[in-house]
Image (cartoon, rainbow, N blue to C red):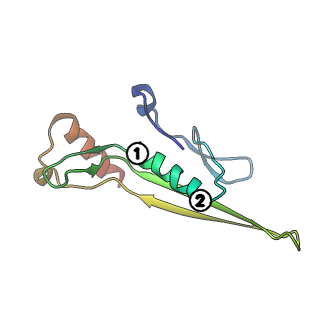
Amino acid sequence: LLVKGTPAASQKKLQIRLDKTGAVAVEHLTEEEVLGVEDLDALVDRGTSARAVAATAMNSESSRSHLVTILKIVSFNKQTKEKLQGKMLIVDLAGSERLKKSLTADNAQKESIEINKSL
């Protein structure tokens, strides 16, 4: 879970690289084990509450940050000792709005431009 709670952290670019096994890795992210639905709900709530939102003329709660969730699913068969693994990627992108219609100004306008570039 990456939460950019401090101004210094929010200025850092995320570094994406390949790890030793050849898998894609993003620096400064953490992996958390989830053992049930309640754990997953709590983790999603934590991530969602850390998202940046702002009001625009088009949307009272316009998402100003992307949300990327990677679920690694591991299943272990106790009888055969077989282990199966899978991965699910869930992405919710920040809102893209036309500057003329959103009526944003100053920093919010710069933010809108950066969001649109990142899409």
Residue at 17% x, 48% y is: 56
Q: Residue furthest bottom?
A: 80
Mark 1 vs mark 2: give the one in front.
1
Quadrant that contains the C terminus: bottom left
Residue at 46% x, 30% y is: 9
Q: Residue furthest right?
A: 80
N-term mark: 1 or 2 = 1
SS assignment at label 1: helix
SS assignment at label 2: strand
Q: Amino acid at mark 1?
A: Ser
Q: Residues within 10 Å of mark 2 (few under 14, many from 20)?
A: some
Residue 75, how many percent across, how many down? 74, 67
Q: Are marks 1 and 2 in contact (CB under 8 Å)?
A: no
Q: Residues within 10 Å of mark 1 (few under 14, many from 20)?
A: few
The mark found on residue 115 in the picture is none
Q: Which residue is mark 1?
A: 49
Residue 59, how many percent across, how many down? 19, 54
Residue at 33% x, 53% y is: 94
Quadrant that contains the N terminus: top right
Q: Amino acid at mark 2?
A: Leu
Relative to 63, 23 lies left or right? right
Residue at 22% x, 35% y is: 107
Q: Which residue is mark 2?
A: 71
